Image (tube, grey):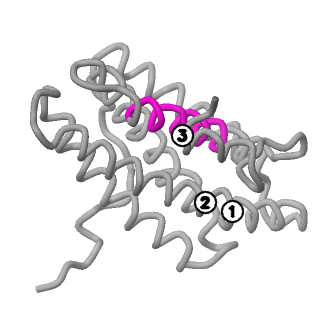
Amino acid sequence: MAGKYTARNREGDHVLKADDPLATRLLKEEHHRFRELFDAVEEAEGEALVPIAQELCLRLAVHMTIEEEILYPALKPVLGDDEINEGIVEHASGKTLAAEIEQLDGTETLYKAKLHVLGEETIHHIDEEDRDMFEDARQAHAAGKIDLDALGETLRARQAELYAQVEKTGELGPTDEADAEEIPTAA
């Protein structure tokens, strides 16, 4: 039986479609994996949470990097600022929480709660991307305004490069993600 998040993989715009351009297919496949992992968080307890959290934090870091370096800049002239800027702000929130989780060892009282909140925020974000951004991008692709297949090749190559970097050094290394400092805060 699918968990509460994984069940969405078979619903509406979350479904992998045969005619999904490569960029959206690649990212939706990752979204499916995130839903599976966040369901695993909900079911796991104690030290079983740690490897799930580690995989989540790594995958999220790579995923957000390729979106911010490649996808968002390519879509911004086509879709406009609002959708893209919202995604960047949501990423910043997720990065902050993921960084906190990475500093923990799994024995902390709030460990599972932090993972749960990261899940709620991430699922909200990826659901919106699947439903709104990717569908808008698909329409732009169909209209010849953007080549999501070529963009998908670039995303896939950068994703492989980042995972190879992690395998080699244990770190992502330098990235060109959106600068969190660009996000204004209340004074």
The amino acid type found where label 3 is placed reads Arg
x and y percent of residue 136 in the render?
74, 68
Identify which residue is drawn at 33% across, 46% down.
116
Q: Which residue is mark 3?
A: 35
- The answer to whether mark 2 and mark 3 are in CB contact below 8 A is no
Type of secondary structure dominating the magenta stretch: helix
Relative placement, left or right, of 30 versus 187 is right
Q: Which residue: 22% across, 19% down?
A: 47
Q: Secondary structure at mark 1?
A: helix
Magenta includes 19? Answer: no
Please tell me whether residue 110 is drawn above or below residue 49 in the rendered image.
below
Q: Which labelled disc corresponds to residue 50?
A: none
Q: Name the residue at 71% across, 48% down.
A: 24
Q: Earlier in the sequence, mark 3 or mark 1?
A: 3
Return the x and y of residue 181 as percentages of the image width and height: 23, 67
Name the residue carrying label 1: 131
Q: Nearer the viewer, residue 161 or 4?
A: 4
> Which portion, as a residue range, is magenta?
27-41
Amino acid type for the residue under numbered disc 2: Glu
Look at the numbered discs 2 and 1 and tell me whether their residues touch, using CB distance below 8 Å: yes
In the rendered structure, the answer to whether residue 172 lies left or right of residue 138 reads: left
Labelled disc at residue 129:
2
> Label 2 to label 1, Cα distance in Å?
6 Å
Please tell me whether mark 3 or mark 1 is closer to you in this view.
Answer: 3
Closer-to-camera residue (53/108): 108
Residue 83 picture location, percent across and down:
56, 73
Relative to 112, is 171 above or below?
Answer: above
